[in-house]
Image (spheres, rainbow, N blue to C red):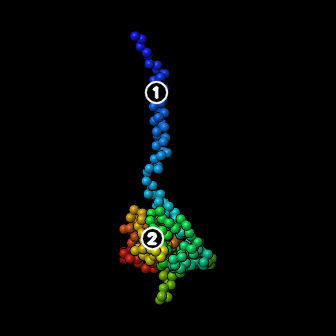
Amino acid sequence: MKQIKSSPFLWAISEMEVIFIVILVAVLFVFISPFFMPKRYPTRQTTCTSNQKQIALSFIMYTYENDGIFPQATENWAATIDVKGKILECPNDKNSGSSYAYNANLASAFYKRTGETGDFSNIISITDNSNTTLTVNNSEIILTADSDAKSGIMRGKKDVAFWHKDGAILSFADGHVLYVKKDKMADVRFEIGSKQEGEKQ
């Protein structure tokens, strides 16, 4: 009986087929896997940070166009500074409507002007009921924050929503934005010229 010898060429083809299948499976995995993986959390936090950065810049533009005065604290503050749409929505907020609140303590506050040029300084002032002028550096006071306050207005830590891994995204009056953990909220200012609730004396 005659034996049939296996050809080395046929063996090479089958190896090539295996390699081709492995490459094909790897390519398919790369393209299909994102659909089965949960959305990455940092992306949501980045979106929220970007939203509040744009809102803070809109506030700054508003104050510069209105003699350095901050807008009134009303439910329509977003329309006042001409902000609308998706910018007002945090991806982690499950409720409808705006996800951010404006610090009511800044309502009617104003930027001090400097020297002969009359340019705005980085000092925000407000006159209280006793005609005392209180001041704060614009990099120290919260402008907006994640919040589920239905009015869209906040006055302190109790109005901040901690949607981002036990922390919140906050914008400040100078335009910078920070992620702040819940246990560090005592270090940020809500009011002009006074200590905050829970703040170390």
- Disc on res. 34: none
Image quarter hosting the C terminus: bottom left
The residue drawn where x is 55% and y is 78% is 71
Query: Is residue 4 shown above or below 200?
Result: above
The one of 111 and 33 positioned closer to us in this rendering = 33
The one of 30 and 186 positioned closer to us in this rendering = 30
Cα gap from disc 1 to disc 2, whole angstroms? 62 Å
**Residue 78 quadrant:** bottom right
Residue 86, image x, y percentages: 53, 65
Q: Which residue is mark 1?
A: 14
Residue 55, image x, y percentages: 54, 69
Q: Is residue 164 visible?
A: yes
The one of 105 and 117 positioned closer to us in this rendering = 105
Query: Is residue 83 shown above or below 67?
Result: above
- Which element carries disc 1, helix, strand or loop? helix
- Mark earlier in primary sequence (1, 2): 1
Q: Which residue is mark 2?
A: 147
Residue closest to the far right: 117
Residue type at tag 2: Ser
The residue drawn where x is 48% and y is 78% is 104
Residue closest to the far front: 1
Residue type at tag 1: Ser
